[in-house]
Image (cartoon, rainbow, N blue to C red):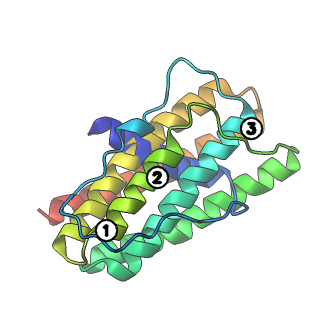
Amino acid sequence: MSQGLRLTGLIVAALAVVACSKKESYGTDTTAASSTISADTSAMAPATSANWTDENIFALLDEANMADSAAGAIAATKGTSSAVRDFGKRMMRDHHTLRAQGEALAKKLKITPAPPSDDPVMPAGQKHMDILNSTAKGKDFDKAYIDGEVDIHKAVLDVATKAAGQTQNAQLKNLIQKAAPAIQAHLDMAEGIQKSLK
């Protein structure tokens, strides 16, 4: 579960780095109800063997921000707990802002984001969205969303750490380092809500 949490953090960081240029299209299959309560975000743990280019890092950050913003949009309307709805709204707002900052920097640096072949973010984000879309509104949804957010933010922190260590671009490194406290704050909030839902 700690890998999943790190992934969530990484996704948040990623969203902070890359702006809103990518489309926010995730599956919305709402036909099946699911009793699954938490997302399996273990696939989002950063691969340790591959080296990411700056193009890869921008893409990963954008994907993470996009995924967390999209998940927040679902929670803002489908959440039962006011804390879950408010957190979802905050994720939409904060990750849109982080995404815009990343997009502006990529444009300034003339870097076109390109996901790496070992992209851990997109599959994990899609899996989380599938769970949220298929879980009925109620306590199970609230738990699935918050458990996923805890896991994802932990994973995003890991991705951000790896990305900051691999880039040689001082501006990109600075953007990631500035986003890290926001990601940690999101993780802390999600963990607080998670405890209140038990």
Query: Could you give the CA–CA distance between mark 3 and mark 1, rounded to whole angstroms?
Result: 33 Å
Residue at x 64% of width, y 34% of height:
116
Mark 3 vs mark 2: give the one in front: 2
Q: How many marks?
A: 3
Q: Mark 1 points at which residue?
A: 134
Q: Position of residue 49 (x, y in %)?
A: 54, 17
Occupied quadrant, residue 89: bottom left
Q: Mark 3 points at which residue?
A: 55
| Direction from residue 32 to residue 113 in the image, left or right | right
Query: Could you give the CA–CA distance between mark 3 and mark 2, rounded to whole angstroms?
Result: 19 Å
The C terminus appears in which quarter of the rendering? bottom left
**Badge 3, how many Cα within 10 Å: few under 14, some, many 20+?**
some
The N terminus appears in which quarter of the rendering? top left
Residue at x 19% of width, y 68% of height:
140
**Badge 1, how many Cα within 10 Å: few under 14, some, many 20+?**
some
Q: What element carries label 2?
A: helix
Query: Could you give the CA–CA distance between mark 2 and mark 1, rounded to whole angstroms?
Result: 14 Å
**Please, what is the three-letter code of the amino acid marked with disc 1?**
Ser
Residue at x 31% of width, y 45% of height:
40
**Badge 2, how many Cα within 10 Å: few under 14, some, many 20+?**
many
**Please, what is the three-letter code of the amino acid marked with disc 2?**
Gly
Does residue 173 appear in the picture of this structure? no
Q: Position of residue 152 (x, y in %)?
A: 39, 48
Q: Mark 2 points at which residue?
A: 125
Placement of 154 over or under 169, stated as above or below: below
